[in-house]
């Protein structure tokens, strides 16, 4: 991933922020035929120091469910258009439009499993935080035949991350006055994503 030096982030707590916001990835691999395989999946995220592991599952019919080995997971954070009109120095510095964003590329190894007990346990752990986030309490029930049948339609995976790239493009190459002004302007815009970018700009621009 091309990342100018000003936007490289090495503190993995920034990765924690992205997953806390949205534990949903784009998973990319290459099949034996050379064709690219792409899936969009919710995951469980676990980090212990530098060690990062993602867990989730595919539909069994997904061709990627047969892949083992190298893969890339992309974690998309908030993003927003930045107008040059928002910079205090827009005229003397001849500022131009840009786009601010936060994203992570995780490189690693995929392994899969289809043991029913392990799949049931995965479904329980995967659904729990999402159910809690919407105020519900659905749970996988290993005693229900309908739930057992569901397991035969999925394949679980474990993705062990070997290299993490974090690109947090948040106007760090600008004077503090520009960062503050853009963050204020984004806060006046209507979307939640724009507000999230403003908060990240203040945090990573040391304006909090």
Image: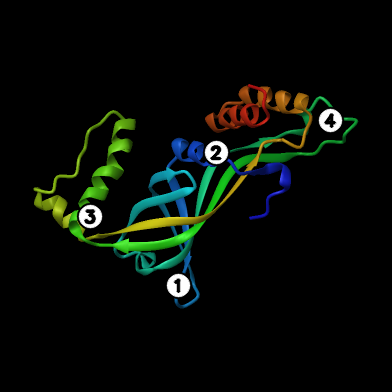
Left or right: 196 as drawn, with respect to 54: right
Left or right: 27 as drawn, with respect to 153: right
Q: CA distance from mark 2 to mark 4?
A: 30 Å
Q: Earlier in the sequence, mark 1 or mark 4?
A: 1
- Residue 118 rendering spot, x and y as whole percentages: 22, 55
Compared with 26, 168 (above or below) is: above
Q: Quadrant of the C terminus?
A: top right
Circle 2 — which element? helix
The numbered dot on residue 90 is: 4
Q: Residues within 10 Å of mark 4 (few under 14, many from 20)?
A: some
Circle 3 — which element? helix
Residue for badge 3: 118
Left or right: 80 as drawn, with respect to 75: right
Q: Nearer the viewer, mark 1 or mark 4?
A: 1
Residue for badge 1: 31
The numbered dot on residue 196 is: none
Q: Residues within 10 Å of mark 2 (few under 14, many from 20)?
A: some
Compared with 109, 183 (above or below) is: above
- Residue 60 rendering spot, x and y as whole percentages: 29, 63
Question: How is the structure coloured here?
Answer: rainbow
Q: Earlier in the sequence, mark 2 or mark 3?
A: 2
Quadrant of residue 98 within the rendered picture: top right
Q: Nearer the viewer, mark 2 or mark 1?
A: 2
Residue for badge 2: 14
Rendered residue at 64%/30% (across/down): 201
- Residue 29 rendering spot, x and y as whole percentages: 47, 65
Circle 4 — which element? loop
């Amino acid at each position: 991933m091309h990342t100018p030096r000003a936007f490289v982030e090495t503190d993995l707590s920034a990765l924690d922020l992205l997953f806390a916001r949205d534990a949903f990835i784009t998973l990319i691999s290459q099949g034996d035929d050379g064709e690219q395989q792409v899936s969009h999946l919710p995951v469980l995220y676990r980090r212990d120091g530098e060690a990062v592991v993602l867990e989730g599952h595919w539909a069994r019919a997904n061709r990627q469910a047969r892949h083992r080995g190298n893969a890339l997971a992309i974690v998309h954070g908030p993003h927003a258009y930045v107008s040059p009109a928002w910079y205090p120095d827009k005229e003397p510095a001849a500022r131009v439009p840009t786009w601010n964003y936060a994203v992570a590329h995780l490189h690693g190894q995929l392994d899969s499993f289809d043991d029913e007990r392990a799949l049931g346990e995965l479904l329980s752990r995967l659904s729990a935080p999402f159910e809690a986030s919407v105020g519900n309490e659905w749970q996988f029930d290993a005693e229900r035949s309908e739930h057992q049948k569901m397991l035969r339609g999925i394949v679980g995976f474990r993705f062990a991350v070997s290299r993490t790239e974090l690109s947090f493009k948040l106007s760090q190459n600008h004077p503090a006055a520009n960062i503050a002004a853009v963050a204020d302007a984004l806060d006046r815009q209507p979307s939640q994503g724009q507000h999230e970018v403003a908060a990240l700009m203040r945090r990573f621009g040391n304006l909090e």
